[in-house]
């Protein structure tokens, strides 16, 4: 595990849950009525990020639905990090046009991921060729069209590239997190053997130490999480706490160390909950993230105090 948390490979930041779409499977409740945070909060979060970040993925909601705030964020990221961070934008692409794309490029975005090419989104992928033309017209023509899901895929050689994907029966919809609208609409993955935690977007490697996937955390609006689904209690508040300090605290806590290993069933070992007992509860709840929620709620006072994550050998 790392000891210097002032350098992180990847941060996935959902800075808005406002979205022009309203998909049934959306894990974070984004919609035209989705939650938003203020510009002041966003600037406080930028000031609290680690000193060195290799890649920053800005997402939502739909980031372009909050264009003005997105531009302010990009300006402040540039001011703080110069060109040392690769900025990626995850968007449904619905609101993207040539003018907006050129501004985003000028403000430092080098990678665009269209995450809506499927039948579950409003436009059902129908804009793909139009988007291809828009990217081509602005010189965004890197050859990497696949989703950036594999370990080494960051700091790409080509400075400007785009890719696309969508929900299908295997990914996102197939492995749908028990969160947000997916939970409300009862389309979450009911399979106790499916361990989201150990794959990219899960908690594995959020503290570093593994080299098969990037060290990545997510910030959901302001909630600092080890993973994209988000733990029931966040690790910290990025508006008020330095992310590096929060990660350092997590690195001294046995529960979060088990999550870093992608092993939620072992998160209770230091608190007398063995793997067998955890597996039984997980079987009952049918989903590893629901087990994780249950465990954190049961042991909140052993894991957290008023300053955040406690030391727990
Ligand atoms: S899945 Fe994406 S496009 Fe659909 S509501 Fe959520 S953020 Fe918006
Ligand atoms: S098990 Fe917990 S830490 Fe792991 S992905 Fe699910 S919510 Fe995140």
Image (spheres, grey):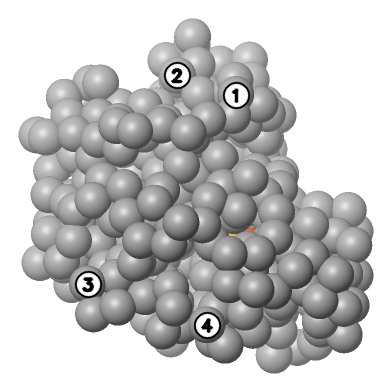
Distance (Cα) linking label 2 and label 3: 35 Å
Upstream in sequence: badge 4 or badge 2: 2
Q: Which residue is mark 2?
A: 155
In three-dimensional space, the C-alpha distance between marks 1 and 3, rounded to whole angstroms, equals 31 Å
Direction from residue 190 to residue 232 in the image, left or right:
left
Q: Is mark 3 within 8 Å of ligand 2?
A: no
Is the residue 308 above or below the residue 228 in the image? Answer: below
Q: Which residue in the structure is indicated by mark 4?
A: 299
SS at badge 2: loop
Count residues near mark 2 (Cα–Cα under 10 Å), then give few for <14, some for 14-19, many for 20+: some
Judged left or right of residue 313, residue 150 is right
Q: Do labels 1 and 3 touch, CB within 8 Å?
A: no
Q: Which mark is residue 211?
A: 1
At x 67% / y 35%, what residue is drawn? 149
Q: Is residue 253 above or below residue 284?
A: above
Disc 1 versus disc 2: distance between alpha carbons?
Answer: 15 Å
- Dot 1 and dot 2 residues touching (CB under 8 Å): no
């Amino acid at each position: 595990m790392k000891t210097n948390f002032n350098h992180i490979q990847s941060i996935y930041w959902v800075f808005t849950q406002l979205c022009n779409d309203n998909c049934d499977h959306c894990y974070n409740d984004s919609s035209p009525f989705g939650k938003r945070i203020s510009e002041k909060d966003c600037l406080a979060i930028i000031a609290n990020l680690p000193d060195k970040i290799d890649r920053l993925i800005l997402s939502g909601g739909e980031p372009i639905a909050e264009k003005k705030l997105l531009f302010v964020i990009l300006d402040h990221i540039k001011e703080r990090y110069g060109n040392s961070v690769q900025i990626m934008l995850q968007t449904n692409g619905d609101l993207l046009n040539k003018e907006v794309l050129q501004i985003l490029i000028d403000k430092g975005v080098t990678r665009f991921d269209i995450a809506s090419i499927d039948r579950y989104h409003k436009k059902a992928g129908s804009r793909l060729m139009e988007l291809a033309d828009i990217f081509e017209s602005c010189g965004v023509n890197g050859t990497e069209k696949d989703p950036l899901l594999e370990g080494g895929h960051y700091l790409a050689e080509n400075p400007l590239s785009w890719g696309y994907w969508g929900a299908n029966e295997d990914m996102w919809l197939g492995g749908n997190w028990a969160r947000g609208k997916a939970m409300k609409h009862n389309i979450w993955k009911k399979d106790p053997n499916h361990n989201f935690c150990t794959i990219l977007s899960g908690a594995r490697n959020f503290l570093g130490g593994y080299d098969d996937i990037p060290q990545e955390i997510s910030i959901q609006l302001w909630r600092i999480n080890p993973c994209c689904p988000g733990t029931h209690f966040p690790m910290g508040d990025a508006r008020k706490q330095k992310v590096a300090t929060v990660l350092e605290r997590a690195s001294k806590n046995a529960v979060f160390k088990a999550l870093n290993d992608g092993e939620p069933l072992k998160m209770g070992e230091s608190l007398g909950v063995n793997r067998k007992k955890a597996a039984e509860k997980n079987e009952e709840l049918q989903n590893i993230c629901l087990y994780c929620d249950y465990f954190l709620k049961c042991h909140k006072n052993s894991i957290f105090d008023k300053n955040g994550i406690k030391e727990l050998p």
